[in-house]
Amino acid sequence: MAPKLAGSIATVAAACVEIAAVLRVAPIAGQTGLAGATNVQGEAQKELDVISNDIFIKHLRQNTDISILVSEELDEALHMQNQGAYAIACDPLDGSSNLDVNVTVGTIFSVLAVDPANPELLQAGTRQLAAGYAAYGPSTSLVLSFGKSVSVFTLDANGVFVLSADAVRVPAASGEYAINTARERFWDAATRAYVAENVAGETGPAGKRYNMRWIGSMVGDIHRILMRGGIFMYPLDSETAAKGGRLRLLYEANPMGLIIEAAGGAATTGRGRILEVPPQDIHQRIPVILGSADEVARVEAHYRAQG
């Protein structure tokens, strides 16, 4: 790995360490409420969304190898005075709606190569140099991939990330799926068919029992799937169709897709590989279905059957 790329990852990791420290005492500091503003997505910002974004900006500005930040919390890409060859795309605090109930939240990030004089940010996920996420739960985990394998680091008592699992693999088959069933009335036929098979359990076409797990934090759900298998689904539905989907391509779908594929899983929109989707906008939304390869293949088969 190039030293400058390693240094950029270290900068992101340092930002995650500071966010973890802020989150530990946020309820005491009264920082779990709304900030009174909305982001470019039209979503109400929590105070900690803003704080986490500011932490990222502070750390990235200190690294001359990073010239651009694309963030869920910023309307436009932030071009720094740095003239480095890397851009960071991130969701500084994924799942912030869960902050007031102490559920796992996280940071998702992607590293792209750019020419600072003429930066191209709308890059397909296959061009990511690295991707990762931090999961702030009972312990703080940093999950990192450069596209070939996946490593997990755990934050120790000294504020240092220590390697705790290497060459992580997603089991090819699983009996768990994650989807917001409260949205069933909006689902397309392929999603309905797949979930119906799972609900049927041993008596259905899948021939085995399934459990549904839904945290409502992408990082929390994906971390569980990475470590023990399963499938995460936020498909295109009748309510999100006008926007193209619910989750963002550059800083949610692409980094998670790279990680899951590097761990032996699969990542699809239902009709094509996520990492091959050409971005049209830095805040572009798309459908996201990823996890155990066998489960993703079943979902894709339903989409093919629907035409």
Image: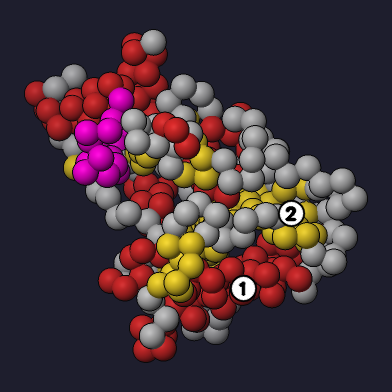
Point out the stretch of residues depicted in magenta.
173-188
Can you say whether 80 is above or below 281 in the image? below
The residue wearing badge 1 is 54
Q: Is residue 186 magenta?
A: yes
The residue wearing badge 2 is 87
**Residue 33 in sight here:** yes
Can you give x and y, in whole percent of width and height, for residue 218 in the image?
41, 52
Q: Is residue 189 magenta?
A: no
SS for dot 1: helix
Which quarter shows the C terminus? Answer: top left
Q: Is residue 207 left or right of residue 63?
A: left
Q: Is residue 273 left or right of residue 33?
A: right
Can you give x and y, in whole percent of width and height, for residue 156 in the image?
50, 78
Can you give x and y, in whole percent of width and height, for residue 210 in the image?
19, 37
Can you give x and y, in whole percent of width and height, for residue 181 in the image?
22, 41
Residue at the spot 28% in from the left edge and 30% down from the top edge: 187
Badge 2 density bin: few <14, some 14–19, many ≥20, Cα 10 Å: many
Residue at the spot 61% in from the left edge and 74% down from the top edge: 55
